[in-house]
Image (cartoon, rainbow, N blue to C red):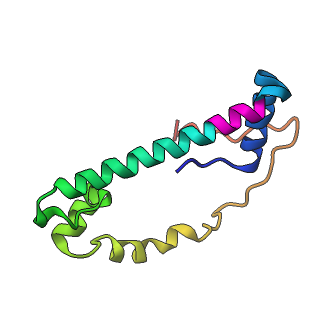
Amino acid sequence: MLDISGWDFMVLAALGLILFGPDRLPKMAAEGGRFIRLLRTHLHNAKADLARELPPELSDMRLSDLTPRGVVRKALGDDPFDDLRGEMDFLREPVPAIYPVRPLDPNEVPPYDADST
C-alpha cells in the first residue's frame, strides 16, 4: 500500500487546490474515489476469476507464496531465517565508541594518519 504521511497528504492537497482550484477540487476528489473503487472491484473480480480457474491443487496458493521467501517457506515448511534474526539482535543495540568523539574546533586540523592512507 502507499506510504503517505500527513505532510505528504497536506502537500498533495495544497497542490491539488492550486492546480484544480477550489471549485473543481471536490469534483475531482469524488471522481478519484470512484476510480479507485472501480479499480478495486475489477482487481477483486480478476482474482476471483483466477482462483475459480485454478486447479484444485493450486487453490490454496496466495500471492505471497510466489515471492522468493514464500517459495523457501513453502519448500521448507517454516522460515529458515528465524534463527538468524535472533542471533543478529546485537545490530539493534548501540555500539559504544572506542575513541571519544568530539567536534573539531574551528581552526583545528583533522587528524591525519599517513600509514593508513
Tell which of 117 and 36 is nearer to you: 36
Instruction: Locate residue 6, reporting x and y percent.
Output: 75, 49
Residue 13 lies, with reference to residue 63, above or below; the image says above
Give left or right: position of 23 versus 34.
Answer: right
In the rendered structure, which segment of residues is drawn in magenta? 25-31
Residue sitting at x 83%, y 27%: 23
Residue sitting at x 65%, y 47%: 4
Give left or right: position of 81 versus 111.
Answer: left
Q: Quadrant of residue 108?
A: top right
Instruction: Locate residue 11, reporting x and y percent.
Output: 77, 36
Give left or right: position of 99 versus 44.
Answer: right
Q: Quadrant of residue 27?
A: top right
Residue sitting at x 31%, y 52%: 47
Instruction: Locate residue 46, reporting x and y percent.
Output: 32, 47
Q: Quadrant of residue 99?
A: bottom right
Residue sitting at x 56%, y 69%: 92
Residue 36 lies, with reference to residue 92, above or below; the image says above
Tell which of 5 and 95 is nearer to you: 5
Residue 104 lies, with reference to residue 17, above or below; the image says below
Residue, far top: 19
Instruction: Locate residue 9, reporting x and y percent.
Output: 73, 43
